[in-house]
Amino acid sequence: MSDQIKFIVDNLNKEPFRKNYNLITFDSLEPMQLLQILNDILAEIDPKQVVDIREEMPEQTAKRMLSLLGILKYKPPGNATDMSTFRQGLVIGSKPVIYPVLHWLLQRTPELKKRAYLARFLIKLEVPSEFLQDETMADTNKQYEELMEAFKTLHKECEQLKTSGFSTAEIRRDISAMEEEKDQLIKRVERLKKRVETVQNHQRMLKIARQLRVEKEREEFLAQQKQEQKNQLFHAVQRLQRVQNQLKSMRHAAADAKPESLMKRLEEEVKFNSYMVTEKFPKELENKKKELHFLQKVVSEPAMGHSDLLELESKINEINTQINQLIEKKMMRNEPIESKLSLYRQQASIISRKKEAKAEELQEAKEKLTSLEREVSLKTNQTREFGGTEVLKGDEQAIEEKKGISGYSYTQEELERVSALKSEVDEMKGRTLDDMSEMVKKLNSLVSEKKSALAPVLKELRQLRQKCQELTQECDEKKSQYDSCAAGLESNRSKLEQEVRGLREECLQEESRYHYTNCMIKNLEVQLRRATDEMKVYVSSDQQEKRKAIREQYTRNIAEQENLGKTLREKQKAVRESHGPNMKQAKMWRDFEQLMECKKQCFLKQQSQTSIGQVIQEGGEDRLIL
């Protein structure tokens, strides 16, 4: 309960409430003040709840608060009987009822603001069925439901845009840049129109230019079709070469191979393919799925700021420290079984990595082999197209030496390689120019589409800007009026608070003075009563009553004390007189005690020594018997 009150006080002291409470002042608030605080928090969530509860009936206040808490989906603890207790506590401002409500509201203020805002538009009004028989009423209700659905979709889109990371400032900058480009293009078109109008037969020339543009577009379309057909032909030739290479390899394998070697090769291929299918590809697929899931998660989340990145870095550091601690604990245990298992695991991981590396090398070698076979088949087909025959390298060199033109084939290959590179570069340049022209056309068409799409938006934006300026001006006027009125009310309030403070201090002083006077009067009354009783007893003729008087008691006490003092003085005098003889006697006794102690020591000493005779003490005399 104390943590709950502390949380409530801390939040009430912050914006927008600024109450300046502490735990003592908050706990000492009256029920009406607690209800006003609850109403202020509800007014912060829903501005319609701004009401001074002193000007409202308690039943209306409780009904209004209960309806809003129901919309906000607040669930009081307990069953139906507790629900009635909750209603009664809300009416009277009971602390056990108000405190949990305040804690719940202050914990979820942003979420509840959004819920209260949506409730204004999404709480459906229940229309009786007999009213819906009217066509006008039914059409209006249907339109109302459609508008509600449209509001739902628009609100969802708005929330998605808020979380997507788009900035309205960037959109406005883009719109302003497009507007400037549009104005420049319009001016440029007007200038060109003015220049063309001065030329003779400009209509005919414009018609010819239009036809030329159409033909150029058609030429570009045909060139694109031609390029697509070339690409299709190139892919078809590649497929044909691939199939021919496979057929050739199969014939070659079938010509000079035995069944055992074929089976061994097939087994190796099956093992390799099974490894790739069961181990390598699933791992890669799982990694790709994880990466895709992570990227989708990153895309779905809103744009992160610097504080979010710092928080993630701190979490990563904490997790890394935890991992290091666990590793240290595991190393400290150092169990032999675990060490053996870790050794086997390490060996297994090394073997698996080597296996994966060899599989990748084999895959790369196969790809390189297929590319080389494709290149060889391509060269062979080119040679056949030019009417040549296949000649081995050694035979070709021998023929060149025989003809006296050694090095001719090498030079021819270099020339062919250089010419092929030059044709590739030229083709790349042409393709780049075509791509750039196509990209420029696409950009121009995209700009024109965006401009045409933004034209009604810009028109509406201008109207909204004008309306915004009017509303801003009106808001400034209202704000100045409000500020002047608030300043007057604030000065009046401060004056009234000072007067109230002075009157309260005066009231407290008068109240303390009243209590002090009342106590003094009571004390005087008691003393007066005692004095009257004493006077009656003292004047009374009865001796028994007279002895009860305080004066008589004090007289007797004085006489007793005087007698006691007299006896004590006599005792003091006797003690002083007998002090000297007593001290002398005490000294004699101490001397006697020392003498006896000395005799005792001498006797003990004599007994401890070796005696020549025997000493007998008798009649106060000592006799030595040898």
Image (cartoon, rainbow, N blue to C red):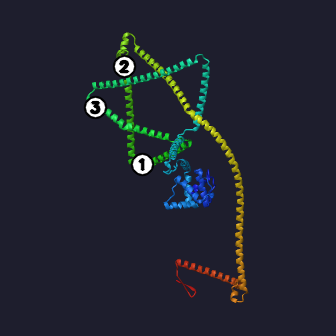
Measure how far apart labels 3 and 2 are at the Cα level: 33 Å
Tag nearer the camera, 1 or 3: 3
Q: Earlier in the sequence, mark 1 or mark 3?
A: 3
Task: Look at mark 3 in the image and give the residue it sits on.
Answer: 263
Measure how far apart labels 1 and 3 are at the Cα level: 49 Å
Count all numbered tags in the image, as a single digit: 3
Q: Which amino acid type is shown beneath numbered disc 3?
A: Met
Q: Which amino acid type is shown beneath numbered disc 1?
A: Asn
Q: Which amino acid type is shown beneath numbered disc 2?
A: Asn
Question: Picture quarter containing residue 382?
Answer: top left
Front-lying residue, 368 or 321: 368
Residue shown at the point (72%, 68%) measured from the top left: 513
Q: Position of residue 453 (x, y in %)?
A: 54, 32
Task: Look at mark 1 in the image and give the residue it sits on.
Answer: 334
Q: Position of residue 201 (x, y in %)?
A: 58, 16
Q: Is residue 357 above or below residue 516?
A: above
Q: Is residue 34 above or below residue 522?
A: above
Q: Earlier in the sequence, mark 2 or mark 1?
A: 1
Q: Residue at the bottom extreme?
A: 542
Q: Residue at the left extreme?
A: 259
Q: Which mark is residue 381?
A: 2
